[in-house]
Image (cartoon, rainbow, N blue to C red):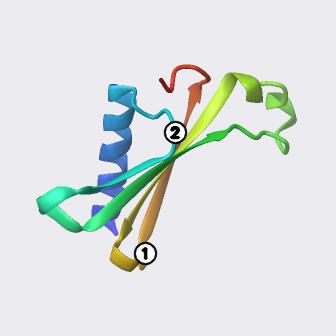
C-alpha cells in the first residue's frame, strides 16, 4: 500500500540521517500508525551475480528496512547500500 511504502522510505531516511543502523533493530510508528511496524537488517553486500561489482562486497553493507502491518499481512521492503563502517 502507499502508506506502507511511505513509512518505509521515511524510516529509512531517518535511520540513515541518524546513523543508527549498527545491527538488526526494530520498532513501531507510534500512535499515528499503531498497526504498522518496522525492522532494519544490516547484511553483507553480495554481488555474486554482478561480475562488475565482484570484490566490492567488503566495502559495502546493505540495509534492508521492512515495514509491515500487524500479523505481517502486508509488507514493503526498502534497501540501501552504505560504505562499510558508515552504518555506525
Disc 1 vs disc 2: which is toward the camera? 2
Write down the residue under mark 2.
23
Write down the residue under mark 1.
72
Determine which quarter of the picture holds residue 29.
bottom left
The x, y position of residue 12, in whole percent, is: 38, 42
Up-down relation of residue 9 to residue 17 (above or below): below
Query: How many residues crowd around disc 1 within 10 Å: few (fewer than 14), some, or many (20 or more)?
Result: few
Question: Between residues 40 and 12, which one lies in front from this camera angle?
Answer: 40
Q: If you read the primary sequence from the N terminus, does the residue marked by circle 1 or circle 2 appear first?
A: 2
Determine which quarter of the picture holds residue 34.
bottom left
Q: Secondary structure at mark 2?
A: loop
Determine which quarter of the picture holds residue 63.
top right
The x, y position of residue 2, in whole percent, is: 31, 64
Q: Residue extending furthest left?
A: 31
Judge left or right: residue 1 versus residue 25.
Answer: left
Which residue shows up at 66% across the image and 27% down it? Answer: 60
Q: Secondary structure at mark 1?
A: helix
Up-down relation of residue 72 to residue 54 (above or below): below
Amino acid at each position: 500500500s502507499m502508506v506502507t511504502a511511505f513509512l518505509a522510505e521515511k524510516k529509512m531516511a531517518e535511520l540513515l540521517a541518524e546513523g543508527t543502523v549498527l545491527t538488526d533493530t526494530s520498532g513501531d510508528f507510534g500512535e499515528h500508525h499503531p498497526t504498522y511496524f518496522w525492522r532494519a537488517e544490516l547484511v553483507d553486500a553480495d554481488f555474486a551475480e554482478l561480475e562488475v561489482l565482484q570484490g566490492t562486497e567488503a566495502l559495502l553493507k546493505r540495509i534492508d528496512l521492512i515495514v509491515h502491518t500487524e500479523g505481517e499481512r502486508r509488507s514493503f521492503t526498502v534497501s540501501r547500500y552504505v560504505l562499510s563502517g558508515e552504518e555506525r
